[in-house]
Amino acid sequence: MQENRHLYEYAIIRYMPKVERGEFINVGVITFCKQKRFIDLQWHLDTARIQCFFPNAPLELIKQQLESFQQIASGAKSRSPIASLDAPSRFRWLTAARSNIMQLSPIHIGYSDDLQLITNQLMEEYVYLREEE
């Protein structure tokens, strides 16, 4: 393994309108590397796609929750005490199992020398649904 490659973890953020049915649409990605103290969360709300499958989706609520996740991931000063924790704690809190409409996939791992590029590629593959060339 090359010295400049780092172990990273990631999870896919999912909008799951009816938890009991297990149906979801991917809306974001969170990537974390303890060694580099790197945490990045990106999201995209494809409202047309969501409304196609779930016409009564609470789009404003989904957006608010994603913005809250974004603030926590970045450690931005906010009303949430979680945002003031260190990056590993914020990542673990964000990826913890929950039973509401915003859920995360199991955590996956990989190695990369460009963590920002990995986050972008994960967004392309899992959220924008664009195939790798």
Image (cartoon, helix red, strand yellow):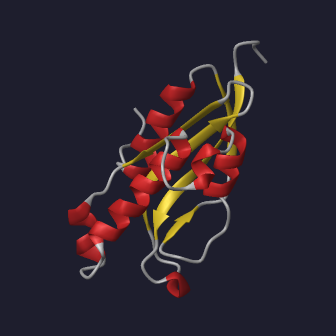
Residue at 62%, 19% in the rendered image:
113
The answer to whether 41 is drawn above or below residue 50 in the figure is above
Q: What residue occupies the far left of the structure in this picture? A: 48
Is residue 118 toward the left or the right of residue 52 in the image? right
In the displayed structure image, the side of residue 76 where residue 84 appears, left or right: right
**Is 29 situated left or right of 36 in this image?**
left
Examine the rendering and report whether any part of residue 98 can be seen. yes
Task: Evaluate whether residue 27 shows in this view.
Answer: no
Instruction: Please indicate whether residue 2 sits to the left or right of residue 61 in the image.
Output: right
Q: Is 49 or 82 nearer to us in this picture?
A: 82
Q: Residue at x 50, y 57 (%)?
A: 13
Q: Which corner quadrant of the image does residue 63 belong to? A: bottom left
- Residue 76 location in percent, x, y? 49, 41
Quarter holding the N terminus is: top right
Image point (44%, 34%), residue name: 120
In the image, residue 130 above or below residue 49: above
Quadrant in which residue 115 is drawn:
top right
Residue sitting at x 47%, y 47%: 71
Q: Nearer the viewer, residue 109 or 95?
A: 95
- Expressed as whole percent of the image width and height from the top left, the position of residue 26 reads 43, 59
- Closer to us: 57 or 128: 57
Q: Residue furthest top?
A: 3
Residue 11 percent location from the top left of the image: 59, 51
**Label total for image:** 0
What quarter of the picture does the C terminus occupy?
A: top left
In terms of depth relative to the viewer, which is nearer, 75 or 63?
A: 75
Q: Image quarter for residue 109? A: top right
Query: Picture coordinates of residue 119 (x, y %)?
Result: 50, 36
- State the residue lying farthest toward the bottom: 20
Task: Give above or below for 71 relative to 52.
Answer: above
